[in-house]
Amino acid sequence: MEYKNLILEIKDGIAILKINRPKALNALNTETVLEIMEAAEFLENNNEVAVVVVTGEGDKAFVAGADILEMKPMNAIEGMEFSKKGHDALLKIENMKKPVIAAVNGFALGGGFEVALACDFIYASEKAKLGFPETTLGIIPGFGGTQRTAKIVGLAKAKELILTGKTITAQEAYEMGLVNKVVPHEELMKEVMAVAEKIKANGPVAVRLAKECVNKSLSLDMDTGLSFEAKSFGICFSTKDQKEGMTAFTEKRKPTYTGE
Ligand code: CAA
């Protein structure tokens, strides 16, 4: 697939999706948001892809937010529509039936932080800076930041981040549970690829169902969530992967999964 503002590379079952507007620190204009949505749909339906990695082109930024030049003249309706496009694109990432890892290689601000938070988890370069500068611009986070952040860090920490608009280091984000691992800048992609490979080696149906169950835990009450888990657990037993995984265990060998 060819994109104007994205670079997509697929190799050995792992897709690397790079946001590619380095002159604007990979800021998200509408065109880029729509391309992210298109790419997420393509990756969702591409059976060769087991794991997706999202990162930013260049050495400086993951994504420095939504495009301020494009937003500056917007009216209320245009602002709402832009926000909804962002929501749709990021929901495609959050609900993708395969894991999506954010490799945060630099600034992840505003909409950029929101892209990372829609991924399943974040690995960050020690150089990365994260935050929600929206209130410093007279707006609020509009690509899910007001909804996803508190679910990770709690209400008070989310409010401090969003109301101050302050930028935090990768280490601070790690300490708050926003980032799973902080790694030396040059090691970022190596570390991310290693964790992607580890997930890729597991049963694809199980990985998909596990992601769906954990995502559901945020919105379902305990009884409904456990019922959803039990049914998903049951589905695993209809797969060749479950037979293979347990047979491989008893035969003391590594399993070979087909995703069936
Ligand atoms: N939108 C548009 N252009 C941007 C941008 C953005 N979000 N962030 C950076 N750029 C552009 C700059 O305008 C600059 O372009 P020119 O060379 O043409 O002037 C270029 O990228 C390089 O940026 P800087 O010269 O500013 O680089 P720096 O190293 O001095 O600063 C920075 C880096 C601290 C990230 C700074 O660029 C910055 O503060 N960017 C804006 C961050 C921001 O406020 N993001 C939130 C946007 S609102 C949002 O995202 C809403 C939402 O929730 C959907």
Image (cartoon, helix red, strand yellow):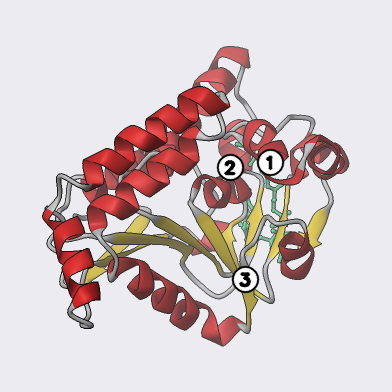
* First in residue order: circle 1 vs circle 3: 1
- Mark 3 closeness class: few <14, some 14–19, many ≥20 residues within 10 Å: many
Compared to 237, does 227 lie above or below?
A: above
What separation in Å lies between label 2 and label 1 (alpha carbons)? 17 Å
What percent of the width, then of the height, locates residue 145? 65, 37
Q: Distance between the residues labelled 3 and 2?
A: 25 Å
Measure the C-alpha gap from mark 1 to mark 3.
Answer: 17 Å
Residue at the disc numbered 3: 181
Q: Is residue 93 above or below residue 224?
A: below
User: Measuring 67% from the left and 68% from the top, which residue is drawn there?
Assistant: 128
Q: Of discs 3 and 2, which sits in the foreground?
A: 3
Q: Residue at x 46, y 32 (%)?
A: 226
Q: Is residue 210 above or below residue 19?
A: above
The secondary structure type at the circle numbered 1 is helix
Q: Where, by quadrant of the figure, is residue 230 drawn?
A: top left
Residue 119 appears in the picture as rendered? yes
Residue 30 visible, this orientation = no
Q: Is mark 3 on a helix, strand or loop?
A: strand
Q: Does the residue labelled 3 lie within 8 Å of ligand 1?
A: no
Q: Name the residue under label 1.
A: 149
Q: Which of marks 3 and 2 is nearer the N terminus?
A: 2
Give the residue at mark 2.
66
The percent position of residue 113, horizontal first and vertical second, equals: 62, 50
* Disc 2, SS: loop
- Cβ atoms under marks 1 and 3 closer than 8 Å: no
